Amino acid sequence: MRTIILRRGLVALFAAAVSFGAIVQAQAAETLRIGYQKYGTLVLLKAKGTLEKRLAEQGVTVQWTEFPGGPQLLEGLNVGSIDFGVTGETPPVFAQAAGADLLYVAYEPPAPTSEAILVPKDSPIKSVAELKGKKVVLNKGSNVHYLLVRALEDAGLKYTDVQTVFLPPADARAAFERGSVDAWVIWDPYQAAAEQQLQARTLRDATGIADNHQFYLATKPYTEKHPDVIKALVEEVRAVGEWSKANPQQVTQQVAPLLGLPADITLTSVKRQGYGALFLTPEVVAAQQKIADTFYQLKLIPKPLSIKDVIWTPPATVAKAP
């Protein structure tokens, strides 16, 4: 009899453990983990809190994690620490080449003035062509990596004609201030801060050579399991973007404290940004494919890529969104 009771007790205990595990998994599944950076519409969305209110109706909570750059954010997606995030054009190419199971979900309109090659205010360098043999610092695999490639090409130089130094933004700025490098390729708000605080001079922005799209990406498993959450997320990003475009001063007041930057620097960044998230078009996919092909030809990625293979195709009910 004692043996039977003991067995029943163990079965009950095991069942309770399984039930608890299921509850924990369910709770994890009901948390949308978003990665963001010190720029862009996701910063605004986080500040407004509208996404949390909308997803609460679906029983979903939102968790935010800040990253210093796109490559680091996509690594977070790849290892499963976040479900969704935003980066520039280049990080997804490197991530796909490394085998990350990611999907492009949406994109923002071009913002070519929101990234640039900067030189110190007293630098004798007046053109991109004069960067030959010089040290150029940038965040490897970020959006500005492609800007540098295209700017050099446009100036008649090869990528190997400059000495690239790879550092994250904060360290890159320190090297730039010390004079350890000759130029810095960077994006907003770091770009605007260097222009106003250091009087850095813009040698070339992306106008005419790179779109500088921002891409929203998610893990493939999450998009497959939660298409309605992704739909709601893109719609909220779009709504905040449209509001931001019409209210730059209000956006600045809201975001400057979050970024830890003065209002004038923040306003410059806000005005240069692209707003209005949309699902990807064939034209945007083709532009991204060109970037992937360029990096393969330069042997910066180990294999050719097919961008169209990693584009999220929304279910019919989701695809009705504008």
Image (cartoon, helix red, strand yellow):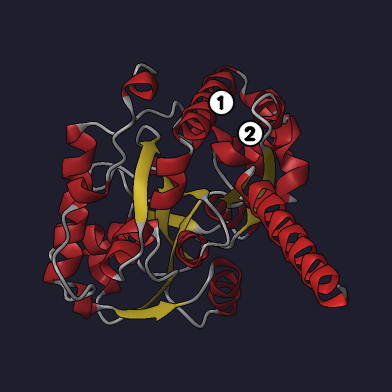
Task: Please say whether residue 297 is visible from this viewpoint.
Answer: yes
Q: Is residue 49 placed above or below 303 in the rendered structure?
A: above
Residue drawn 64% across the image and 54% down it: 25
Task: Please say whether residue 219 is visible from this viewpoint.
Answer: no
Q: Is residue 275 placed above or below 104 in the rendered structure?
A: above
In-image side of 267 versus 305 (left or right): right
Quadrant of the frame with the N terminus: bottom right
Q: Nearer the viewer, residue 185 or 143?
A: 143
In-image side of 32 versus 101 (left or right): right
Position of residue 319 measured from the top left corner of the image (x, y, whole percent): 33, 22
Report if the CB atoms under discs 2 and 1 are less than 8 Å apart. yes
- Specify the amino acid type for callout 2: Leu
Q: Which residue is mark 1?
A: 236
Q: Nearer the viewer, residue 124 or 140?
A: 140
Q: Circle 1 — which element?
A: helix
Residue drawn 55% across the image and 66% down it: 169
The part of the image, by quadrant, that contains residue 149 is: bottom left
Going from N to C along the chain, the mark reached first, 2 or 1, is 2
